[in-house]
Image (spheres, rainbow, N blue to C red):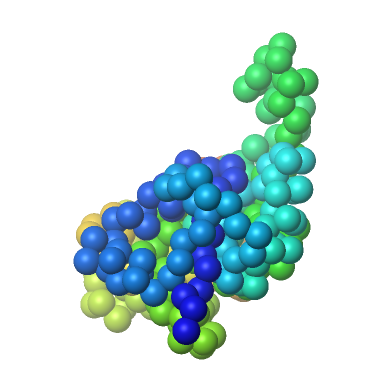
């Protein structure tokens, strides 16, 4: 039986999710054994006409990005958004919070006309995304579960509950009880509450649950010492592209 042909692509982002794939250590050889990597800019010069699975990192932020993502979508069976930039726009989407021309002027100055740009948006704003691996960088455990499911022809299980649930399952002391703030109540689980388990508060890098209660989250944050402006800023860090439309 032929191995699935896999390609990896990157758009606007730091490429940290791609590099995180190389940190699988004991799992890396097992992964490579079950697939045929046919295109990956960071690892090879080869090109392919068709892919069974395309893993795509980064947000869409230029006209060229739009053209490329449509081309990739047309040539793959399954498209997987890899990491928060690809899933929700990520930190890149913070530029959407101010006028686009102002951002171009600030970054490029007199050369701004040489760099056409668009609002930073997730892949799903332009093409159908079959599956997502969230996190900044992408969560390794979740990637392995999705990868295994795809190889077995099964639909991956996608968590849609808050990180707080995972904290409870791991019997973590709530960080609010320790005088810290945390975005766990509105952040989508799947990371096994990694940061709170090591004493660090959740910054929301996995994006939002499907029905977040923004008002309650802001109330909690302000009750624990943040201004409304600072509370809103923390919520927007990884969610600028979806902030207005998805928060209630």
Which residue corresponds to the image point at 51% horizontal and 88% vertical from the top-left? 154
Q: Position of residue 246 (x, y in %)?
A: 68, 64
Q: Position of residue 103 (x, y in %)?
A: 68, 28
Compare residues 41 and 204 and report the one nearer the observer: 41
- Determine whether 236 is above or below 49 in the image: above
Which residue corresponds to the image point at 58% horizontal and 71% vertical from the top-left? 52
Compare residues 183 and 197 and report the one nearer the observer: 197
Q: Position of residue 210 (x, y in %)?
A: 61, 73
Query: Is residue 176 shown left or right of residue 87?
Result: left
Residue 220 visible, this angle: no
Question: In which image quadrant can residue 211 be found?
Answer: bottom right
If the image is split into quadrants, where does the C terminus sit? bottom right
Compare residues 24 and 4 and report the one nearer the observer: 4
Query: Is residue 200 shown left or right of residue 91?
Result: left
Question: In which image quadrant can residue 109 be found?
Answer: top right
Return the residue found at the far top: 110
Which residue corresponds to the image point at 69% horizontal and 63% vertical from the top-left? 75
Which residue corresponds to the image point at 47% horizontal and 75% vertical from the top-left? 3
Residue 14 visible, this angle: yes
- Determine whether 8 is above or below 184 in the image: above
């Amino acid at each position: 039986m032929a191995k699935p042909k896999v390609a990896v692509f990157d758009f606007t982002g730091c490429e940290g999710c791609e590099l995180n794939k190389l940190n699988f250590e004991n799992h890396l050889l097992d992964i490579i054994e079950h697939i045929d990597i046919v295109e990956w800019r960071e690892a090879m010069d080869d090109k392919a006409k068709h892919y069974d699975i395309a893993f795509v990192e980064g947000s869409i932020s230029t006209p060229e990005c739009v053209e490329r993502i449509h081309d990739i979508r047309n040539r793959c069976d399954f498209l997987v958004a890899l990491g928060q930039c690809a899933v929700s726009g990520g930190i890149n989407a913070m530029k959407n919070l101010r006028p686009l021309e102002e951002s171009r002027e600030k970054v490029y100055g007199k050369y701004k006309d040489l760099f056409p740009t668009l609002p930073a948006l997730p892949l799903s704003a332009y093409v159908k995304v079959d599956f997502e691996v969230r996190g900044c960088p992408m969560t390794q455990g979740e990637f392995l579960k999705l990868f295994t499911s795809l190889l077995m022809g099964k639909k991956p299980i996608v968590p849609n509950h808050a990180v707080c649930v995972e904290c409870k399952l791991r019997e973590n002391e709530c960080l609010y009880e320790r005088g810290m703030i945390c975005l766990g109540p509105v952040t989508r689980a799947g990371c096994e509450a990694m940061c709170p388990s090591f004493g660090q508060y959740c910054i929301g890098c996995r994006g939002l649950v499907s029905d977040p209660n923004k008002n309650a989250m802001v109330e909690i944050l302000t009750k624990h010492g943040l201004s409304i402006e600072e509370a809103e800023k923390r919520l927007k860090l990884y969610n600028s592209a979806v902030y207005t439309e998805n928060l209630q």
